[in-house]
């Protein structure tokens, strides 16, 4: 049977990526799109597209019902928090299937402070958080929280109004700006414990209180992160799939705490505390993230396609509810399709020309002073003097520390260019690199070293420690 889906927000990045994931995992599918913006609608990849009024317009639902009836839509999937909230209203009646959480659950999840209080009451790890009642109350809140403090708006997405601050005066000025220039009152803000650790995203499907499927990834870098006051964003530029059962445990406990009969899809944001505990910062109930492809195009099971089957009561038989798919990366940029690659594919069809002053010639070794890179014409890595050079605006990669007396290794350099000299070993059992790389660059370095290890079989283990920057620019 061919199923017909209606996706709102057709032409947006979130809907385009969701369409791609659905087509990859559910072949007998017709996708219908709708949007109130004719320009975005024009670039939609749906099979058919409809221009509808804006969500707040009184004729929106009438137009939506006409589209659903004409296309004989089986399932409607909203793509924004505002649509999820509107479709869960008691008076909303649509002539097709919706697979959304209950209204009370959606309302709770869309208020980050209320959600924080509810989860804390059930013992779910969350950051210490306080609501802002007025600008005068900031000093009392700061007295309860360690520095820095995370300041943000308690509703919305995309890290709205988010910024790390170290003094109450900074928070007061930031909130006053949003009040005067953006019309956001001080009471819309919350102050939270700053979480310096790894940044996780988790997507899960629930039905009638039972977990059906869950997947996890880690964000490594962000769209516009360097230009945002927070230095981060909820939209990743580079992310990787990870095996993180501790993250799954927190997310599962959270859903069971807020709804014993939960149904629908839930997207979770978590960050590790200074003690390495993943703390839940928000739940986007009833919708997929814009970067859903990392969950749909990796692992044994396509998450978006599974959602459709569960929503339409089709049989779904999964061996495990947790489907970790390690070693995959999601790479996103403006105006390009999301790339999803396995680590082994990241070197395919790429010629490394970093640091080369001339083209490689047959019979001559092509030495690359920019990264740990070895070509087929070079001698064994144990005999090579590898050279690592960082960009001029970065600190040195770090120091190579030996874990055993053999092999002996020397580190020479002036802080920007490091030369590692190795005596010929029988085998390198362990390499530990400590540096000041951000997670994005550290991941690239690990991949290059692992490629060498796989090629020569001389490195047994690899451990890279990265010093994550604090909001004041220092290393954590």
Image (cartoon, grey):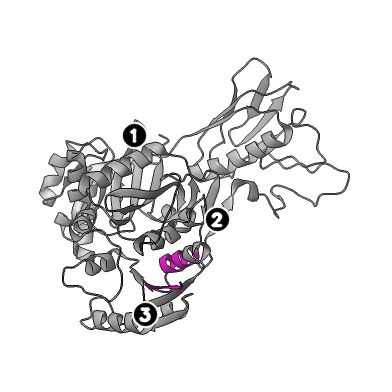
In the image, is 161 to the left or to the right of 379? left
Does residue 341 appear to the left or right of 314 in the view shown? right
Q: Label 3 belongs to which residue?
A: 72
398 vs 439, nearest the viewer = 439
> Disc 2 marks which residue?
340
Quarter occupied by residue 37: bottom left
Residue furthest toward the right? 363
Indicate the position of residue 30 as horizontal and vertical percent values.
Answer: 46, 74
Circle 3 packing at 10 Å, graded few (<14), some (14-19), many (20+), is some
Q: Residue furthest top?
A: 405
Q: Secondary structure at mark 3?
A: loop
First in sequence, mark 1 or 3: give its number.
Answer: 3
Real-space Cα separation, disc 1 to disc 2, in angstroms: 28 Å
- Left or right position of 371 against 134: right
- The residue carrying mark 1 is 277
Q: Which residues are magenta?
A: 1-20
Residue at (13% x, 51% y) in the render: 135
Taking the spot 52% from the left edge, 33% from the top edge, the residue there is 435
Side of 455 where 269 appears, left or right = left
Q: Earlier in the sequence, mark 1 or mark 2?
A: 1
Q: Which residue occupies 28% across, 81% down?
A: 65
68 and 60: which is toward the camera? 68
Q: Can residue 43 be seen from the camera position used here?
A: yes
């Amino acid at each position: 049977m061919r199923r017909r889906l209606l996706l709102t927000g057709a032409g947006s990045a979130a809907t385009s990526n969701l369409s791609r994931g659905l087509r990859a995992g559910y072949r007998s599918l017709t996708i219908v799109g709708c949007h109130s913006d004719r320009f975005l609608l024009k670039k939609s990849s749906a099979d058919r597209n409809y221009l509808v009024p804006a969500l707040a317009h009184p004729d929106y639902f009438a137009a939506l019902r006409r589209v659903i009836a004409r296309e004989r839509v089986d399932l409607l999937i909203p793509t924004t928090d505002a649509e999820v909230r509107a479709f869960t209203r008691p008076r909303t009646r649509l002539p097709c299937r919706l697979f959304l959480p209950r209204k009370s659950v959606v309302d709770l999840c869309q208020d980050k402070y209320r959600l924080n209080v509810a989860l804390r009451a059930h013992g779910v790890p969350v950051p210490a958080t306080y609501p802002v009642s007025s600008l005068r109350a900031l000093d009392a809140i700061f007295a309860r929280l360690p520095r820095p403090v995370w300041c943000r708006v308690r509703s919305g997405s995309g890290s709205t109004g988010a910024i790390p601050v170290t003094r109450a005066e900074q928070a007061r000025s930031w909130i006053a700006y949003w009040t005067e220039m953006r019309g956001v009152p001080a009471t819309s803000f919350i102050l939270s414990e700053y979480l310096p650790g790894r940044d996780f995203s988790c997507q899960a499907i629930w039905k009638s209180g039972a977990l059906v499927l869950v997947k996890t990834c880690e964000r490594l870098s962000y769209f516009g992160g360097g230009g945002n006051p927070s230095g981060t964003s909820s939209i990743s530029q580079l992310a990787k799939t990870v095996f993180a059962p501790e993250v799954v445990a927190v997310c599962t406990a959270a859903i069971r705490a807020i709804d014993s009969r939960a149904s629908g899809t839930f997207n979770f944001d978590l960050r590790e505390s200074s003690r390495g505990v993943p703390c839940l910062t928000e739940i986007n109930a009833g919708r997929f993230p814009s970067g859903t492809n990392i969950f749909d195009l990796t692992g044994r099971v396509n998450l978006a396609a599974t959602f459709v089957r569960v929503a339409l009561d089709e049989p779904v038989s999964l061996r495990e509810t947790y489907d970790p798919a390690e070693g995959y990366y999601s790479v996103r940029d403006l105006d390009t399709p999301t790339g999803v690659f396995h680590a082994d594919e990241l070197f395919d069809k790429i010629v490394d020309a970093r640091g080369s002053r001339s083209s490689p010639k047959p019979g001559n070794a092509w030495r690359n002073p920019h990264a740990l890179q070895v070509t087929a014409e070079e001698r064994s890595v144990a005999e090579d003097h590898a050279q690592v050079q960082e960009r001029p605006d970065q600190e040195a990669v770090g120091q190579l520390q030996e874990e055993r007396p053999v092999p002996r290794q020397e580190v020479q350099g002036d802080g920007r260019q490091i030369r590692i000299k190795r005596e010929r070993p029988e085998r390198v059992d362990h390499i530990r690199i400590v540096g000041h790389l951000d997670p994005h660059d550290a991941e690239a370095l690990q991949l290059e070293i692992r490629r060498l290890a796989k090629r020569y079989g001389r490195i047994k283990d690899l451990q890279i420690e990265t010093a994550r920057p604090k909001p004041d620019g220092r290393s954590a």
